[in-house]
Image: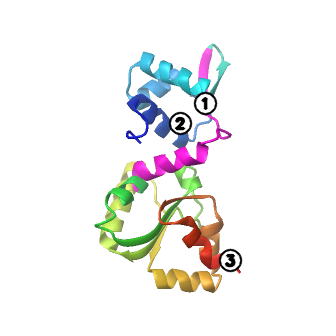
Amino acid sequence: MEELFISKVRVKLLKLLLTTTEPLLHVREIVRRVDEEINAVRRELLRMEKFNMVTSEWRANRRLYHFRKDYVYYRELLGFVAKSTGVGGEIVKNKNKLGKIKFALISLRYLKNHPSAPDDVDILVVGQIVSPELQAIISDEQARREAEINYSFMDESEFNFRVKRRDPFILKVLTQPKVLIMGDEEDLLSGLVV
């Protein structure tokens, strides 16, 4: 994202505001989390508000901010964040060590740090996967988040078989709100078309 956004403060703000579970954040809390100067953060927040990326409101003499989900590039920016940070960023960065990945996707619920139900799948990786490498990435992210990640991986033939059979597990994963971090969405969903 630094290649696309020249302001490192803006990048940090996007990462924070797009993944936080808190509906509103105060400027001082934002400054603490992004570890940048307050004036730089305020300046970027004003720019982002000018372009309708964020909105603010006053509560008890405090200005609180949140990212607008109706912002025209919301999903695209969320995709940037998913592909450059956390477990998604690690999968992209280590794709050669992980084998031959055909598809990798992360649920939107997971990206927004919402709790998962036991039968939810946060991450699905399809291809010829080196499982110890993937498990190491997942373990590191679980330790960082202090929460378990529900993930699954399978080879392409098993995935295609399950899609063709309309397996409930695969259908649930493919129809949930998600961000595809590797692969082509048209290819991913091609087996579902009847």
**Which residue carries the number 3 mark?**
193
Which of the marked residues, 3 or 2, is nearer the chain's N terminus? 2
Q: Which residues are magenta?
A: 62-87
Task: List x then y, in percent, for residue 137.
Answer: 34, 60
Q: Is residue 26 above or below residue 168?
A: above
**Which residue carries the number 2 mark?**
17
Q: Is residue 83 above or below residue 135?
A: above
Which of the marked residues, 1 or 2, is nearer the chain's N terminus? 2
x 47%, y 71%: residue: 152
Which of the marked residues, 3 or 1, is nearer the chain's N terminus? 1
| Amino acid type at mark 3 | Val
Residue 133's image quarter?
bottom left
Q: Are marks 1 and 2 in contact (CB under 8 Å)?
A: yes
Is 76 in the magenta?
A: yes
x 44%, y 52%: residue: 83
Could you tell me how far apart the alpha carbons at marks 3 and 1 are, in whole angstroms? Answer: 37 Å
| Amino acid type at mark 2 | Leu
Q: Are marks 3 and 2 in contact (CB under 8 Å)?
A: no
**Which residue carries the number 1 mark?**
54
| Amino acid type at mark 1 | Val
Could you tell me how far apart the alpha carbons at marks 3 and 2 are, in whole angstroms? Answer: 35 Å
* Residue 146 visible: no
